[in-house]
Amino acid sequence: MSPDAKAEQLIVALDVSTQEKAIELVRMLKDQVGTFKIGLQLFTAAGPNIVQKILQEGVQVFLDLKFHDIPNTVSQAALEAARLGAQMMTLHTLGGEAMMKQTRDTLQECSLKEGWPRPRLLGVTLLTSMDQQMLPSLGIDRPLDQEVLHLARSAQEAGLDGIVSSPRELPLLRQERREGFLLVTPGIRSGKAKSDDQRRTMTASEALAAGADYLVVGRPIVQSQDPVQAVQTLLGEIPIG
């Protein structure tokens, strides 16, 4: 794997509360990383225009709002989000196949009609902050890895482009995914970093070896005293070749 290929697989999560800090980070890191994730914190604080402002820096945007509602509401909200120009977006797979499929179909139809590229739609399975002991409170009686696999299958049946899951489930997911179906993994930590509130974590090299297509890293980079060095450390843990 070349250095450029390693950088393309890393997505920096802009888990900050101001537009100014987000743009500062993008300008600091865009020569090393091509995609930046906007989540609920930044989107709520800065508003939809933050997507376009970051796109103006010549990078790609992963809009991670985890839509979860009735099919009509999600499909229309996702349509407005897609019109902002993000290259990737998230839905919650627990919203069901009908919600995911209607959203995918709406974006496909409108993107062709209006002339903009449809963002890749990713289904969020179970959050990396969750573990087996938490599932009964949600009414889930499957083992955690089997629930993630079930949700991944639903996302594939609905026509989504990939899923977001913990790196711990990657070996199982890799066995069943269809060609071109993306596996995007948060919960990535440097070998020297603590896991914070994320319980199902791996290092970058472990996750890629297990089958991840993209790695999402937030706090270990954005909360570092030296974000550039934090990125270089993570990339340095990924073997070339």
Image (spheres, grey):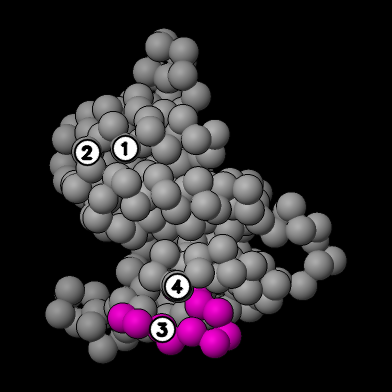
The residue singled out by tag 4 in the image is: 225
Amino acid type shown at disc 2: Gly
Looking at the image, is mark 3 or mark 1 nearer the viewer?
1
Task: Give the CA separation, mark 4 to mark 1.
Answer: 24 Å
Q: Main secondary structure of the magenta part?
A: loop
Look at the image and tell me in which quarter the N terminus lies.
Answer: bottom right
The residue singled out by tag 2 in the image is: 47
Q: Residues within 10 Å of mark 4 (few under 14, many from 20)?
A: few
Does residue 209 appear anywhere in the picture? no
| SS under mark 1 | helix
Report the span colored magenta. 186-197
| SS under mark 4 | loop
Give the mark, 4 or 1, whose residue is nearer the N terminus: 1
* Rendering coords of residue 238 (x, y %): 70, 71
- In the picture provided, is 33 more to the left or to the right than 237? left
Q: Nearer the viewer, residue 123 or 18?
A: 18
Q: Residues within 10 Å of mark 1 (few under 14, many from 20)?
A: many
Amino acid type shown at disc 1: Ile
Q: Residue at position x 63%, y 78% from top? A: 206
Residue 50 — which label? 1
Residue 195 — which label? 3
Check if residue 193 falls in the magenta segment.
yes
* Rendering coords of residue 61 (x, y %): 45, 41
| SS under mark 2 | loop
Badge 2 vs badge 1, beta-carbon distance below 8 Å: yes
* Rendering coords of residue 116 (x, y %): 46, 19
Q: Residue at position x 55%, y 79% from top? A: 190
> With respect to residue 10, does 130 lie above or below?
below
Q: Residues within 10 Å of mark 2 (few under 14, many from 20)?
A: few
Looking at the image, is mark 4 or mark 1 nearer the viewer?
4
Quadrant hosting residue 94: bottom left
Give the mark, 3 or 1, whose residue is nearer the N terminus: 1
